[in-house]
Image (tube, helix red, strand yellow):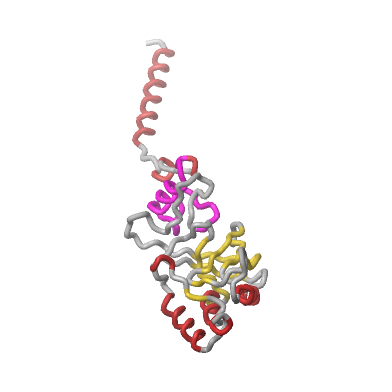
Amino acid sequence: MPFWPRLSATVTLITLMVGLMIALVPTSPASAADKDCGDFKTQKAAQIFFLNHGGPKRDPHRLDYDGDGVACESNPCPCYYGAKPPGGDRKPARVRQRGKVTHVVDGDTVDVKIKGGRIKRVRVLGIDTPEVYNGVECYGPEASASMEALLPEGTKVRLISDRTQGLKDRYGRILRYVLKGGKDIGQVQVRRGAAKVYVYHRHPFERVKSYRKAQRKAKKADRGLWGACG
């Protein structure tokens, strides 16, 4: 047989063998199933996928780019900010973050620059303070001043989620316990009489017993709002 036909046949055979070998090599699940926010029509769909694939503790698909436990925040609603899939009984992971306070909004809300991320508005879990916006309520300014004294700009804090509560509220604020050193700032506000214990929809948070104990003591001593507001 002439040289060129033999060479052509050999090349064809090698090509077929290489193709067969490539087909038999297992594809990496991570690369085959990789997702981005554009793959989901709504934020809720992205969040459920995120939670079912390790979130909020793990994020192999990088859907939670700022690490606040909520995936694809720019996607259109319907939205879902829960820490576990709807109707699921899987125990959600606890979200832990570090950051610096940039601004005190009022007695129960602060802005925090998350380490490695952006500024987030944080609604302190487990407390409610009198309003200072859309009408000033009794002890509202004092509650805000108390928070400003506890968390001046630049204060380093730790943010911790509660596995019985959502990661965000309906206004898009992240829900966290705020810790400064060993102090639970929400509980300090309650102890000072600058805040009341707040349970959302009769669904108690994990630290509710210690918060209520602090509230009973503040109320008995007429501290803060308990003495000033009747």
Which range is magenta?
39-68
Percent across and percent down for residue 60 are 45, 51
Magenta stretch secondary structure, dominant: loop
Q: Nearer the viewer, residue 106 or 9?
A: 106
Q: In the figure, is residue 126 to the left or right of 202? A: right
Percent across and percent down for residue 26 are 36, 40
| The magenta stretch spans residue 54 | yes
**Residue at (61% x, 59% y) in the render:** 119
Q: Residue furthest right?
A: 153
- Quadrant in which the C terminus is drawn: bottom right
Q: Is residue 102 above or below residue 11?
A: below
**Residue at (55% x, 55% y) in the render:** 66
Q: Residue furthest bottom?
A: 221
Q: Is residue 150 above or below residue 42?
A: below
Res. 100 in view: no
Q: Nearer the viewer, residue 182 or 15?
A: 182
Place residue 154 in its image quadrant: bottom right
Q: Is residue 116 above or below residue 196?
A: above
